[in-house]
Amino acid sequence: MRTIDLCAAVALCIVPSSQLLAADEVSVERGLYISIIGGCHFCHTEGYREAEGKIDPEKALKGSSVGWQGPWGTTYAVNLRDSARGFDEDAWVDHLKNKVQLPPMPWYQVKAMTESDMRSVYLYIKSLGPPGESAPYYREPGKEPRTPYVTLVPPQTPKKK
């Protein structure tokens, strides 16, 4: 299993410096950069956190078996390779601009991305290769997950007097 050490990748120019990437550039390299600084790999790449930010190309953006459970049920970071397969570039951008996701997905941050960043992320995802298996599916509130999960308990809001 081969991993990419982020520091080595930058040194080898595999990941260009953010200064070399124009803000309106649409490229695979910019997509990789956005996926790292945007936190996509944190949830959508199994083992990314444990690997201290090293991206395993075999696992990159294939989703995660670890669920996030809260009052909404249990959600999973989807396999973005599989998701992107169902869209062309324009439809992908439209999807990102209009889709509201369940927690903990920060969909409001995705909507704030520039269109060129959305297109670059699409190109990066498509460059990763076959999608592999789907991540586990959403579980409704009260249904026990079949995989490990993190419990997120929102703070209670005091009742107004």
Image (cartoon, rainbow, N blue to C red):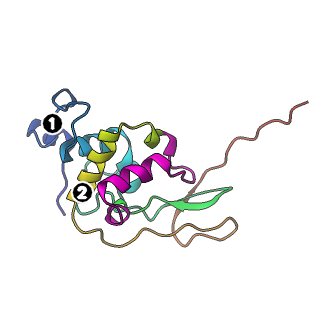
Give the answer, above or below, for where 120 lies relative to 46.
above
Q: Residue at x 30, y 71 (%)?
A: 132
Give the answer, above or below, for where 51 lies relative to 140.
above
Q: Nearer the viewer, residue 52 or 10?
A: 10
Measured from the top left, where is residue 160 in percent x and y?
87, 32
Could you say whether the residue bearing mark 2 is in a helix, strand or loop? loop
Image quadrant in which the C terminus is located: top right
Q: Between marks 1 and 2, how big is the CA–CA gap?
A: 18 Å
Question: Left or right: where does residue 86 sit relative to residue 74?
Answer: left
Q: Residue furthest left?
A: 12
Q: Residue at x 19, y 44 (%)?
A: 27
Q: Is residue 112 visible?
A: yes
Question: Left or right: where does residue 109 sit relative to residue 74?
Answer: left
Label 2: how many Cα within 10 Å (few below 14, some 14–19, many 20+): some
Measured from the top left, where is residue 75 in percent x and y?
55, 60
Stretch in magenta: 81-108
Q: Find disc 2 in the rendering and name its residue.
A: 56
Residue flagged by tag 1: what amino acid is it? Pro
Q: Residue at x 54, y 53 (%)?
A: 101
Q: Nearer the viewer, mark 1 or mark 2?
A: 1
Q: Find disc 1 in the rendering and name its residue.
A: 16
Measured from the top left, where is residue 89 in percent x and y?
30, 54
Q: Nearer the viewer, residue 118 or 90?
A: 90
Q: Report the predominant secondary structure element of the magenta stretch.
A: helix
Q: Is residue 52 visible?
A: no
Number of labels in the image equals 2
Residue flagged by tag 2: what amino acid is it? Asp
Measured from the top left, where is residue 111 in percent x and y?
46, 41
Could you say whether the residue bearing mark 1 is in a helix, strand or loop? loop
